Each structure stands twice: as structure tokens, then as C-alpha cells.
Amino acid sequence: MPGTVQSIERAAAILRMLAGGRGRLGLSEIARSLDLAKGTTHGILRTLQGVGFVEQDRGSGQYQLGAALLHLGTSYLDINELRSRSINWADPLAARSGEAVRIGTVLEGQALVVHHVFRPDDTFQTLDVGALLPLHATALGKVLIAYRAGPVPADLPAYTRKTLTAPRELAAALDQVREHGWAADVEEFTLGQAAVAAPIRGYGGLVIGAIGVSGQVERICDSHYHPHPHLVTSVRDAARAISRDLGAARR
Amino acid sequence: MTESYVVAIDQGTTSTRCIVFDRRGQLVSLAQQEHKQHFPKPGWVEHDAMEIWRNVERLAPRVLRRAGITIDQVAAVGIANQRETTVIWDRVTGIPVGHAIIWQDTRTDALVHSLGALPGAAAVSDISGLPLATYFSGPRLRWMLDHTPGLQQRAERGEVLCGTMETWLIWNMTRGSHVTDVTNASRTMLLDVHELDWSAEALDFFGIPRAMLPEVRASIGAFGTASEAFPGVRIGAALGDQQAALFGQTCFTSGEAKCTYGTGSFLLLNTGTELVKPGHGLIGTVAYQVAGESACYALEGSIAMTGSLVQWFRDQLELISSAPEIETLARTVADNGGCYIVPAFSGLYAPHWRSEARGVIVGLTSYITKGHLARAVLEATAWQTREVVDAMNATSGLALKTLKVDGGMTADNLLMQMIADVLDVPVVRPLAVETVSLGAAYAAGLAVGYWPDLDGLRRNWHIAGQWMPAMDPALRDTEYANWQRAVQRTFDWIQPA
């Protein structure tokens, strides 16, 4: 077994203490109970505060468990906050690519569209924020499942002849997504349509959403049905810019 | 040839941002720094002008670095700023004599009341196009001169200078050029809005020495070359933030309107080269002026609190931890449950202009949850927009057909749908929500020939999102009537001392 990381053990001890205590605790109290230097304790608390696991009361300066910790199992980032933080980068992506942009996150086994920017040609289009897309048949969805723990979904309905319906096929495609850092769907959900998507990462690099462009297959892809490299670059740049704003480390 | 860019400085109420734009008007990089809000007494709101200037100095290299460009790739810089916020500083040392008093500050309430009783008050309103109110810079300057010992004498001797934020920034960037633009000057009550220069009559009325005032220039033209922050770059334009947003939305012709949803919200309707006689609580203001051309005017309806009501909900009530979560909370319920919030925290602006009004929450019952309150917070913004649009339609004789929107709150889908519902017209978001900065960039780029003309800018405008009205007309009427009854209940709360 490889060695353990001491600061993580200490952080866990602090969280246990806060969870087991009678509400808020002061810095000295925590340091004393765990027999740690105040400076060390403060550093760990600040880090935990930064990721939202611990909150500091404004008045008393005491610490308590943070809201992010309580919602660990459900949603990592509020979807409306994700839209709000992405909007400045989704617009330039639509302008540069000339295609519609969507941002998605996982909701109950499907990809929920949380933001949609129209294709910038001033034709009539309808907002589809709130729409649900299949994870295995769309670029957004493939990004979202590629970075999730757990097995590949077993039930893979076909939308077109190109939809990946065999779990082994999908698993191989997801390996590719993880290797290259982006996903595509070429007529896998809708005939004549293609899409490219890349992951949006939050604190610690955790994937919390996906951003992508979609449009007619002849505009998105070259004659070999491969997405144009400049589109892939634009999508990945936008994803990285949002991730940076959300606190993901540069990579 | 290396690509060149235009930089906008957006000196706002809560933060200062520098943004790099490319030739298509798309955002390339952004750097932002918040500054401290000082609340020394109820109704008082101040900023440290020096802190704001230091932020600009810090943001300039940061935004260029993020864009991966060098200063010689910047064709021009444009400024958009919070309007009516006023600061006085020492001409020699450059140090402010006190904090800047910001547009939300109501300390001049009593002063405005007594000024309103003087002969000449009506004439000053006609000259400036503005109602006498705490909102504008003139009364604020009078207050500062009255409450700082010896300041009046120093102002008369020309030892201290005053200005709104663009004047302060340009003075610092150019090391001593003391200038303002017509849009900002049109918010002081000191400008003759027809002649576009300081009015001797208005200066006399407020007792403001001309020696402390900046020179008035066209918004789009020449403000000198920066030696600080963006050394060597031409300052091509300065505009009040709302006028900048109108420009950024490419509302260049008469009849085009936009509403910017930020801390407060501001609906501006371009009225062309003619200043429409304002009524229904609307303001006549300069939209922009290109150097050497006649000015373009606008009708404006200002709403004091929209985004700031959400901030209050977050920071003071602590019912949400970030502003966008208001939508999440509001969606936990289907309607407002009969609850209405009228955010007259520092009085009401258009169309009421009631400085003595204070906020109310009405319709509280045991049934009401925080979800209903969140919904009422968002609805307050929608209904306040409706009131201003009704006033615009009545004053201009036109019926608004679509509303172009921008600002941070356009990220709130529920709110945008509510606005479409209560106005019964489509709400359209352009492919650039940062229209304040974009307008400043457009204006500066136009001044230096980076963009050839207005049509070139118009081609950059595209629809990014659209919300269609889908509310039952009977329900709309009932809800509007309820809202108006709630508004009535805010009136006459503060009583004259």
C-alpha cells in the first residue's frame, strides 16, 4: 500500500470534528483537540473553505461544515450558476464557430441543457434550455459520462444507424474521449447533424459539465466525417476558459 | 501583420473590468476587480476613487496578458463608467479630498427638497432635461462643497477639480487632462442639454465654481493618449455606462431601445437628434455624440434596484449563496403565492420618482416560503420594467415591439421569460452580454478608424437567445394590478423631519 497523505488525514479529522461537534468551532479549539499547530490548522481550514467544505461565520470567525459538503452526493454546482459563469465564453464560441452552442450537465441519466446560444445567423430558433439529451448519442453526453465513475450504461437505444448501441463500442469511444479531451457525434442522434464537445472542470479538475457546438454535418465535419480541427480547438479553448473561471487548475 | 484589438474599461458600481475585444466585437479576455462599498450612514454610499484607479492600473497588464497580446496591439481604449458618481480631488497632489459619493447615495435628500423650493429650480430642470433629484451630480457637488471646510474657496481658486468617474480615470491616465464627455455631463444637472456645454444659470443655481469643472467633449473623438495604465494608447471614447450599452446594442437609430439589467436597470430609447420632451418620470439624456456631428439623444427610464435586490437577498437575508441560485430557489414554486416585494430601498426611480418611498413585502401569509420570496424578487424586476415600458410608450407615442436586453441578469432564464410575459413582447439577447464594455470599445474603435462606420458595427450584432411571451392575458392584468397596489404601499413612508 502506498503511503498516506498526512494533510488529507488531518483535513478528514477536522471535518469529522465539525460534523460531530455542537455546531461551530473556533480555530484554537480545533487545533488543540487535534494537537496541531495553529498555523497548520488554519491552512487546512482555509483550503477546505476554498472548496466549500467548510464555512466561516462572519461574526464570530468560527468554522462549520460548508454547504458544498452537504450536497456532495447530488449536484456539484448549481446549474443556474454554471450558466451564469459560462455565458461570457459561450457567446464568443458561437461567434467564432458560426454554430449553436449548448452547455450540458448530468440529470438522472440524461444530459440536461442548461444554456443554449443560437447559431448567429439571425434565423428563427427556439431556446431549448431544460431539454434532455441521451448521454450515449450526443457529444455533450459522451463527455459527461466519459469522466464519471461507474459502469457504462447498459441500455443504449438507437436514434440513427450510427448510434453506438453496444456497451463495448461505447466504452472504447469513451476511452478515446478521455485520451483526446473532447468528444464528437456525427449523425449519431439526428441525421444530418454533428457536434463537438469538451469538458468543463471545477475545483480540483472535477468535470461538472460539457460545452459544445452542433450544426449541419457538412459544416462541422470534413469530407471524411471528421470534425474540423479549428472547431475542436475553439470548443476546447472555451471549455478551458470556463474551467479557469470556475477554479480548475491550469493544465 | 499582427492583429490589433480594442480595450474597454468598464468602471462599474461594484467592480472595474478591463475587456479586450476583437474586430468582430467578440470578447478575447477579461480581468475584473471588485472595490469596497462604504456605507457610513443609512442612505450613504461611497467609493474610494484612489482604490478604483489602482484597480485600473492593476487590471491593464493582466487583461493584456490573458489575451496574449502586447500593448502595441491595442488600437484604442474606451471608457464606460457608472454615472453621476462624483469625486473632488486636489489639482496638485491628485489625492481625492474625500470618498466619491455614488449614484445610489441619498444624503442630498433634504438639500434637494430645499433647492426645489427656490425660484429657478424649474428653469434648471428645463435646461438640463432632468428632474431635481438626489440621483444627479449637481446636488452632490453642492453637498460636498458645503460639508468640507474651506472647499468652496479652494474650488473657486481652481485648486481642486471635480468629475465623474471617466473624468477621474482620464485625468489619471493622461496625467492631468481634465475632460468629460457629453453623456456623463448630461447627468450632472449642470449641462445645458441643448447647447451641450455647462450652463451658467445652472452653475449659479447650485453655486458650483466653473473653475473646478472639466471641459465637455464629444463622446467619440479624442481624449488624449494614455501615459499610465495603457501607455501610448489613444483614449478614443468615454460614455456613461448605459449610453455605452445602447451603443453596444447598436441602437443607432430613432425608435431602437435596450434594457440593461445590472445593479439597477436602465431602459434607453434612441430618439435621434431631437430631444423629446420627457414626461411620465422619464429622463431626457444624450445618447452619444461623434466629434464634429450633432448629438444623438435618448429617453431613459431608470430602475434603482434590480440586481441589487438579488444581492440583498444573498448577503443580508442569506437565503442563497450566489446570485444565480435565485433562479433555482424561485423554480421550487409555481408562482409568487400572493407575495410581492417592491424594492424602494432608496426610493423609487422611473416612472414614480418618489424619494420618500421605502421597500415593502406585502401579501405575507403562513403559506409563503423562501421560494415565493425568491420569485417575488425576480418578478419585481419584471414589473418595474413593465412600468417603464408603459411610460416610454406613452411619452414617445410608439409601441415597443421587442426589447433588446443585456447585463448580468440576462443569464437568468426565468427572469427573461417573466419579462417577455409581463411586457407581452419578445425579449432578445444579443451575442454579447457585455454590451456596456462593447459599446465603449465600439465607440473608441470608431474614433480611431478601427471600425469604419456604424453599419460595420451593426453587422456584428446577432441574436443569441429569444424569449417569447406565453402568459395568460387575464393573469397578466390581475398580477399587474396587484403589483401596482403593492407600489402604492411604499409611498410616503419617510416623513419630512
Image (spheres, coloured by chain):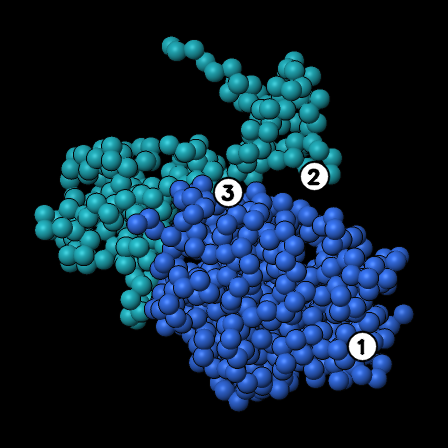
Chain colours: A cyan, B blue
The picture quadrant where one finds residue B454 is bottom left
Residue A86 picture location, percent across and down: 42, 50
Residue A78 picture location, percent across and down: 48, 47
* Residue at x 85%, y 81% (from the top left corner): B118
SS class, disc 3: helix
Position of residue B425 relative to residue B27, above or below, is below
Q: Is residue B207 left or right of residue A185?
A: right
Q: CA distance from mark 2 to mark 1?
A: 47 Å
Q: Nearer the viewer, residue B209 or A247?
A: B209
Which residue reaches farthest bottom?
B397
The picture quadrant where one finds residue B105 is bottom right
Pointer 3 residue:
B61
Amino acid type, residue under disc 3 in the picture: Pro
* Residue at x 69%, y 17% (from the top left corner): A32
Please check whether the numbered discs 2 and 3 fall on a single chain.
Answer: no
Residue A232 picture location, percent across and down: 25, 45
Q: Quadrant of the C terminus of chain A?
A: top left
Position of residue B272 relative to residue A216, above or below, is below
SS class, disc 2: loop
Pointer 2 residue:
A58
Q: Is residue B34 visible?
A: yes
Amino acid type, residue under disc 2 in the picture: Arg
Position of residue B147 relative to residue A75, above or below, is below
Pointer 1 residue:
B205
* Residue at x 76%, y 66% (from the top left corner): B211
Please check whether the numbered discs 3 and 1 fall on a single chain.
Answer: yes
Q: Judge the density around disc 1: few (<14), some (14-19), many (≥20) Cα neighbours within 10 Å.
A: some
The subunit carrying tag 3 is B
Q: How many marks?
A: 3
Q: Quadrant of the N terminus of chain A?
A: top left
Mark 3–mark 1 CB contact (< 8 Å)? no
